[in-house]
Image: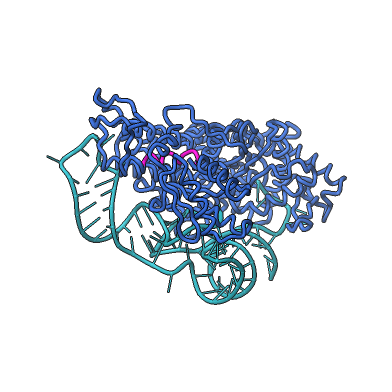
Chain colours: A blue, B cyan
Amino acid sequence: MITEVQDRLKAAVKAVFGVDVTPTVEVPDEQFGDVASNVAMQLAKEVGKNPREIAEQLADTLQELDDFAEVSVAGPGFLNIRLNDEAIWSSSQDYSVQGFALTQPDYDAKNVVLEYACPNWFKELHTGHLYQTILGNALARMLEVAGANVTRTTFGGDVGMHVAKAVWSILKDPEGYAEAQQNDDPQVRARFITQHYVKGTAAFEQGGSDEAEIRELNKQIYAFHTDKSTHSDVSAVYFAAREWSTEYFHYFFDRINVDDFQKYYPESTTAERGMALVRGGLEDGVFEESERAIVYRGEKEGLHTRVFQTSEGLPTYETKDLGVLTQEKEDYDFDRRILITGSDQKAYMKVVWAALYDIDSRYRGTMTHLTNGIVKFADGSKMSSRLGNVTRAIDVLDAVTKVVAQESGSDEKDKVMLGAVKYEFLKYAVGSDVAFDVNESVSTKGNSGPYLQYAYVRARKIALSKTNDDNGEVDIATLSLDEYDRRLAHKLAQYEGVFGEAVEHLAPNTLCLYLYELAQTFNQFYENNRVAGSGIPHRWELLTRYINVLNHGLTTLGIDTPESM
RNA sequence: GCGCCUGUGGUGAAAUGGAUAUCACUUUGGUCUUCGGAACCAACAUUCGGGGUUCGAGUCCCUGCGGGCGCACCA
């Protein structure tokens, strides 16, 4: 709808003023028209006339076109266009039945690597991971619809100080370990490891001999991956717990029903590769030595200095990140790489990428970093996994399950629970803080996943009530839409444009908002207009189109549509 | 201290520089003898303060105040 109008406007501007522009066209508030443009303001300077005058001239030309029922000028020079019913109807036609063509030029046939969730081995997943997983899953699906070959990857720490802390604590206090060996519930084992991580962290912060032991253990664990020396009590515990964590990740991602990652990159597998890059970069002057460590001087890019190799000769997270980046490039030859992490990593990641660009400038301009805000409790305090006061991802699911169970008692409860959680996270713009109150923030009413799921279920059931009287064909020539028919058709016609915008800005919330408004528009239509037994073919057709768009949108966001609720 | 981000109804959020700032929750009051009521309708704000740029500013610039995050061997 937008693009058709845009084309006509462009042609009209060319004809009247001989100027090439891409007119801005948008859907205005309903009172103004079906589509509107402020192209007259765009042109004012170039043409040297006042916008109002330009708009009047364009209106006269546009008024002649068949699809336009009315073209008027308002305010400083807005062009408001009301389409005739036939044009409204046919611009929503593309969405009927199947085979939506929603490819976007920026992504069509491009290789995209999407890295998200990035869990740490030896720690339970918390709400931040839950959020990133849901967001990443939705973006991946959106980009696939847009035509991209998407590879979902995740990168997490299976080596490093946090690991040493957990393993140290288990070795120190093996009580519970035997028990965990017996209990193969992934959630229980993950909990066991996390508790030791918290204890190990506390001991480390006390300093003294505990800290020294943990540092020593850290080196030992790195060596397991280079020497493959896996025959000790220490390595037995390490590899067992590492395996438990891996199983736990698979268990959890399956639990929330998101697409599988094509590839897990544990840090241990990218360390050596990163170290090689750092050594090479040191020779080329990208890195330099400082206090026996190897650092990158970010100041030359307006950033700060970061350590890539410790004075102990160990790689840091920075180096392992270089490793995974180049590994992904080699494995999937990405045209574009999108990374999702917490916003606390923003400045850090800039430095790593600056170093990478210095090493290999091909990467410049191919990478995007999306961040979610800090996940906070509703009282404003920040969660810290180090202190153990996290809201675990599983706690969120449990809390919402309770709410949903009270309200529905249906057999598709799980879909509704996950729908509530997913939509709640997706409906807000990417990047803002996530203030999280387990008991209150996940809604099942109003602008929520369950509202949309219910809207879908209801519409499907209505569609099943079709009788012989309702089987007529829509006849464009005699088509007559009333206020509510028209409003719904108009809203349906916007899907393609909204989807394109959501992809362009990597903003699932745009899509969420549209689907919610669509459902509201339908509910108004349904409240006022009879469908079943009406014998009005276009109402049935609108119902079908509505169901298809809703289904497509929700599915793309990773939200399942239940059969009943 | 330096850098980056942020401030929108009671609460949580939306708004490529465009028209009378949008939505949900809460609260208050309505609709309907259901095509599935998890519905529909109505009421509730001078976008933190002060300057500036612009035909036009929640949005851009400057400044003040408040909040967050990051700044070398953790991830």
- Quadrant (top left, top right, bottom left, bottom right) of the C terminus of chain A: top left
Question: Is any atom of residue A207 visible in this view?
Answer: yes
Question: Quick check: is A497 in the magenta stretch?
Answer: yes
Q: Is residue B43 left or right of residue A319?
A: left
Q: Position of residue A8 (x, y in %)?
A: 53, 42
The image shows residue A274 at horizontal and vertical percentages of 75, 40
Name the spot of residue A343 as percent of width and height, x first.
59, 52
Closer to the camera, A488 or A444? A488
Tell me which corner region of the image, top left, top right, bottom left or bottom right, holds residue A402.
top left
Farthest-out residue, top = A468
Indicate the quadrant where residue B4 lies: bottom right
Q: Which segment is the magenta one?
A: A488-498
Residue at the image point whose x is 43% and y is 34% from the top: A90
Q: Nearer the viewer, residue A492 or A300?
A: A492
Q: Is residue A231 magenta?
A: no
User: As rendered, which of A283 and A168 lies closer to the eye?
Assistant: A283
Identity of the residue drawn at 41% across and 49% down: A33
